[in-house]
Amino acid sequence: GSGLVLAVGCVLGRTLFLQLDPFYASIILFVGRAWDAITDPMVGFFISKTSWTRFGRLMPWIIFSTPFAVISYFLIWFVPDISRGQVMWYLVFYCIFQTLVTCFHVPYSALTMFISREQSERDSATAYRMTVEVLGTVLGTAIQGQIVGKVVTPCIESPLFIGKTNSSVAMEELNMTHDTGSLTDTRNAYMIAAGVIGGLYILCAVILSVGVQEKRESSELQSDEPVSFFQGLKLVMNHGAYIKLIAGFLFTSLAFMLLEGNFALFCTYTLGFRNEFQNILLAIMLSATLTIPLWQWFLTRFGKKTAVYVGISSAIPFLIVVAVLDSNLIITYIVAVAAGISVAAAFLLPWSMLPDVVDDFKLQHPDSHGHEAIFFSFYVFFTKFTSGVSLGISTLSLDFAGYQTRGCSQPSEVHFTLKMLVSAVPVGLILLGLLLFKLYPIDEEKRRKNKKALQDLREESNSSSESDNTELASIV
C-alpha cells in the first residue's frame, strides 16, 4: 500500500515544477538529484548496519520516517508570500522530502528479500507491489484532476497573436486578468490535495507496518557485525549482472519517463486535446494497472528476458503512429492503452529481476552478507536519477524552444520539440536499452541453477550448524 503514496507524490511533484520557470525548475531538479546521489547509498549503508529489533531491521525506518515526510511534503506546497526566496524554499523542502522518502522507499523496496526465500513468492510480491504503485499513480492523477482541476486558470494569449504593438504593455494587461483571488484559489487547491496525499501516506504506512511481517530467516542478513561501506560498495558495483541490468533499464526507464512527463503538454498543444489529457493519462495508467498481472504470467511462462523484449518493444510502433498521424482522439486513446501495456512491463520487470541479481551475488560471494540494502538503495537512486534527468531534459528543451508558460498556443518549435520528446527520443532510448540488455547474463536456465545452488548452500549451512550443536552438546 505504501507504494501508492510514493507514486502519488511523484505525480503531484511533477505538477509543482510545471508552475515554475523552466530554468529554476531545472536547478531544483538537478540539485535534488545530486542530493539523492548522497542520501540513497548512505541510507542503504546505514540500514545494513541497523541492528535487528522486535519490529525487524527495515520496518523502524519506514515507521519513523513517515510523519516527518508528511510534514515536509505539506511544506513544499505551503510557500510563504516572499518575492525572492520561493525557489530556495522549494529547493530546501524538496531535498528534505526526498531524503525522508529515501528512508522510506529503500527499506520498503528491500523488504521483498525479507518476505520469503522462494523466487516465485518474491516475484508474486513484486507484481503485487508494482500493481499498487501504478494504481497509486492513477489515484494521484484522479486527485489532482478533481481537486486542482476545479480551479480554472485561464491561459495567456501571446502578444504576437493579439495585435498589440507594445508587447510588454500587452503582457502586463493580460497578467492583470490573473487576479490575486485566482492565484489564492490555486494555492489552496494544491494544499488541499497535499493534505489528502499526506493522509494517504500515513494510512498506507500503517497498513504496511501492521500487515507485513519481516522475516529474519528469509535472508542471509544474519550477522550484526559492521559492514564496510566502501568494501560493500566495491563488491556491489563490480557485480557484472547488476551493472548490466542497471544499464539496460536506465535507458528504457528514461524513455518512458520522457513520454509520461511530456504527454500532457503533447496532448494539450500538439494534438489539441486540452480538455482530454487527464482522461488520456488515466487510460494509460489504468491499462498499466490491469496488465501487470498479465506480464507476471508472461514472465513466469516464457521468462523475464523474453518479457523485457516483448513488453517494452511493443510501445515502439504506437509511439511512431501518434507522432506521424494527424490529430485523432480515437487513435490517441488506442495509443494510450497500448502505451500503458508497455508501461506495465517497464514498471514490473526491473524490480522483479533485481532479487535474481542479489541471489547471483550471494553465490559468488557466500561469505559476504548484509549488502541487500545497498543493492536496492542504488537501484532506487538510479530510478530517481532517470526521473530527474527526464524532467531536466524536458524543461530545458522546452525553454530553448520558446515554451510559453500557461500559453493558449505555442510556437511551431515547441510542437516539434514535444514530438521529439514523446516519440523519436523514447524510441531511440528503448532500442539502445534493449541492445544493452542483451548483455544481461541471467536467463531462465541461469536462474534455475542459482536457485538450486542456493538451496544446496542453505542445506549445507544448516547441516553444519546442527553438527556443531550436536558436538557442543556431547562435550557438555
Image (spheres, helix red, strand yellow):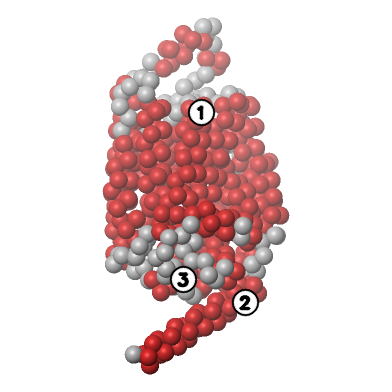
- Neighbor class of circle 1 (other Cα within 10 Å; few <14, some 14-19, many 20+) is many
Answer whether labels 2 and 3 touch (C-beta < 8 Å): no
- Neighbor class of circle 2 (other Cα within 10 Å; few <14, some 14-19, many 20+) is few
409 or 185: nearer the viewer = 185
Residue 213 visible to an observer of this rendering: yes
Determine the residue positioned at 51% across, 35% down.
30
Badge 3 is on which residue? 220
Secondary element at image label 3: loop
Secondary element at image label 2: helix
Q: What amino acid is at disc 1?
A: Pro
Task: Identify the residue at the far top of this view.
Answer: 165
Secondary element at image label 1: helix
Q: Earlier in the sequence, mark 1 or mark 2?
A: 1
Badge 1 is on which residue? 22
Residue 306 visible to an observer of this rendering: no
Residue 449, numbered label = 2
Determine the residue positioned at 29% across, 58% down.
206
Q: What amino acid is at disc 2?
A: Lys
151 or 385: nearer the viewer = 385
